[in-house]
Amino acid sequence: MKSTHGTQLRHLIELLDGAVGDAYETAGLNYRPRYTPVMRSLMAKEPATIGFIAEAAGITQPAATQTIALMVKDGIVSVQASPTDARQKMIRLTQHGRDLVPQLKMCWQATALASASLEAALPYSLTDVLDSAIRALAAKPFGERIREARSQLENDSTNTDKGTQK
């Protein structure tokens, strides 16, 4: 049975994130791969709102909120109300988070080298394929594609039914 794109992508993520998670553990870090986009955003601008982090990291606000909650539990970031708008939360690295940065940079360099090795072993660039897929889905979301396909199937079914009824 042939796997669907969703199944293949989930498996690829499991393979990649599992290995990266193992590398963090081997380095003695209590750190999850999903923290990296948030961490990089905070390294670029701190303090930052959840909205800024989500946009900078290329993730949804709910995903950013969930990840930040886990990072708070692990003592990597802190959350405080904005001094100008109590409805907004400002996210900062804790001292523990700052102390992780040198070790994380080393892990990220190793991960980048491993990614380059993976790219070299492929017949075409995985990065380019993923970028192309993301652009295609931005131009026409998958939900729209599903609705169109369903409509086509319904039209085909209706035309087939009409053809058999004489």
Image (cartoon, rainbow, N blue to C red):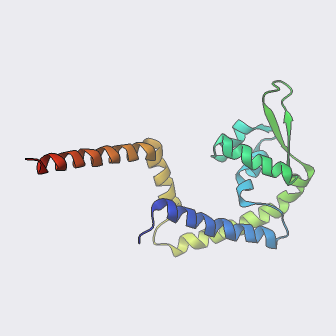
Between residue 46 and residue 31, name the one nearer to us. 31
Residue 151 x, y percent position in the rendering:
31, 43
Quadrant where the image shows the N terminus? bottom left
In the displayed structure, does residue 103 sit left or right of residue 95? left
Residue 150 x, y percent position in the rendering:
34, 46
In the displayed structure, does residue 46 sit left or right of residue 160? right
Q: How many labels does the image show?
A: 0
Q: Residue at x 43, y 42 (%)?
A: 139
Between residue 63 and residue 134, name the one nearer to us. 63
Q: Residue at x 28, y 45 (%)?
A: 154
Q: Residue at x 88, y 52 (%)?
A: 75
Position above or below: 9 against 123: above
Q: Which residue is drawn at 34% across and 44% down?
A: 148
Residue 55 x, y percent position in the rendering:
65, 40
Asked whether residue 25 appears in the rendered view, the answer is yes
The answer to which quarter of the image holds residue 117 is bottom right
In the displayed structure, does residue 126 sit left or right of residue 164? right
Residue 97 x, y percent position in the rendering:
86, 53
Position above or below: 96 against 48: below
Asked whether residue 126 appears in the rendered view, the answer is no
